[in-house]
Every structure is written in C-alpha cells, then in structure tokens.
Amino acid sequence: MHRLAPQVKIVATFGFVVAVVVTPREAMWAFALHAVLVVATLAAARIPLGFAARRLLVLAPFLIAVATLPLLGPPPDLAWGLSRSGLWSAWNITAKALLGTLASICLAATTEAPDLVTGLERLRVPRVVTAIMGFTVRYLDVVVDDVARMNVAMRSRGYRPRWLGGVGPFARSVGGLFVRSFERGERVYLAMVSRGYAGQMPATPGAITASWLPAVVVILTAWCVAAGALVLR
C-alpha cells in the first residue's frame, strides 16, 4: 500500500467513495461489505484501527447534527416522537460519511502530501490547481511557524485576550501575516522565474501498468456490491 503509485491510490479511493455514495440506504448488507473492504485495506496497509478511530473524531460535530434528523425531520410516525424517514436519512449519511472518511484516512496515511500532488499531476489535473496545492503544502509549515512566533511576540508584550476588545490586535496580526505571506510568495515566484520556471514543475514518471491492479480490484469489488444492492432494491 505504501509503495503504490499515488495516482493509483487516488483513483481507487475516488472509485470506492462513489460506489458507497450510490449504494441504496436500505442495503445494510452492502454497507457491511464496504466496511469489510475498508478494514481489509487498512489491515493490508498496517494502519492500526485505533489510529483510524482517532482520526474519525473529526466527524463528531457532524454526526451530532445528523443525530437530530429523526427528531427534527418529517412528522414523527414511530414511538418516542421519532420519524422513520429521519432515521433512514441519519443512517444513510452516517454510514456513507464514516466509510468515505475511512477511505480518505487510508489514502492520507499511506501517501505523503507532496506525493498526492504528484499523483494529481499524473492524472492530468490542471497545472494551475496542482501548482497552488504544491506551494500550499510546501509553505504551510512556514506560515504555521510565523503564527507561532507572532503569538509568542504578542504574549511577551502583555497580550491576554479575555474579552471582545482583544479582537483588534489579533485582527491586525492576521493582516500582517497575510501581507508577509503575499510578499514571500512574490519573492519565491520571482526566484523561480529567474531559474527557468515556466508554469510547471519538472515531469515525473507515471505508474507502470501492473501497479493499477490494486485499484481495479478495489473499484470492481465496491461497484459489484453497489450494483447488487441496486438490483435487489
């Protein structure tokens, strides 16, 4: 999993997520098979389930909002004021969100951020998009370090935001960070142009044909499950 070409993993993840999305909400057995496929992929990549579970916490606020659908959705037609349609909607959104997020976690855990950009380039994503993403990945740490230094400098000068009046200095620091980042971008771009940059980074070799086999297996398996669910609907 870790040695596969990034474009192969991107295509496999996208194909799996689309198959999950088109699966009917009533086909619980299909979602169970999708979950088995995701867990098997995590196991093949040697990603601990605890690691994936911690990353799933990002969905907690979203799932809390979804949990209100049986109560705030269509008129209740079940006990305790619950709505059957609301329950199905909550289940549908929760199952697909969890499976899609697990697939994304597997992709992110086995692929470095620069490799993801390279994979998108090999998939013929517009150069402007990949260039922006590449520079964002490369300079995100620089911006984070700037934020940390500005925070230390503000606190060393007595900045203790405890009420709404503390928003002013914070807003000015954000504006200063934006101007500094913009000027740094201009300097970096001029330096690259002076070294022969013409709008695209040097080309990288593509994946060999045999390396697409895992993506084909994952996509075919997920779509067979989705097609079976649609036929039996």
Image: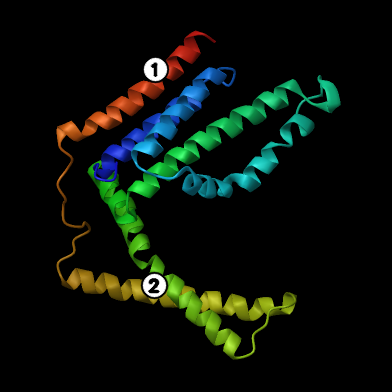
Identify the image quadrant of residue 39. top left
Which is nearer the eye, 75 or 101? 101
Read off the residue under disc 2. 142
Label 1 CA crowd tier, 10 Å (few <14, some 14–19, many 20+) = some
Q: Secondary structure at mark 1?
A: helix
The residue that mark 1 highlights is 224
Task: Report the amino acid beneath label 1.
Answer: Cys
Q: Which amino acid type corresponds to the residue marked 2 in the rendered image?
A: Val
Residue 89 spot, x, y in % from top left: 65, 27
Q: Does residue 146 sit above or below 114 in this rendering?
A: below
The quarter of the image holding the N terminus is: top left
Q: Position of residue 16 (x, y in %)?
A: 40, 30
Residue under the image location 53 percent in, 75 percent down: 175
Mark closer to the observer (2, 1): 1
Q: Residue 48 versus residue 124: which sits nearer the camera?
A: 48
Q: Position of residue 45 (x, y in %)?
A: 34, 41
| Lateral position of residue 170 relative to residue 31, left or right | right
Looking at the figure, which quarter contains the C terminus? top right
Q: Residue at x 18, y 64 (%)?
A: 197
Q: Residue furthest right?
A: 80
Which label number is shown at residue 72?
Answer: none
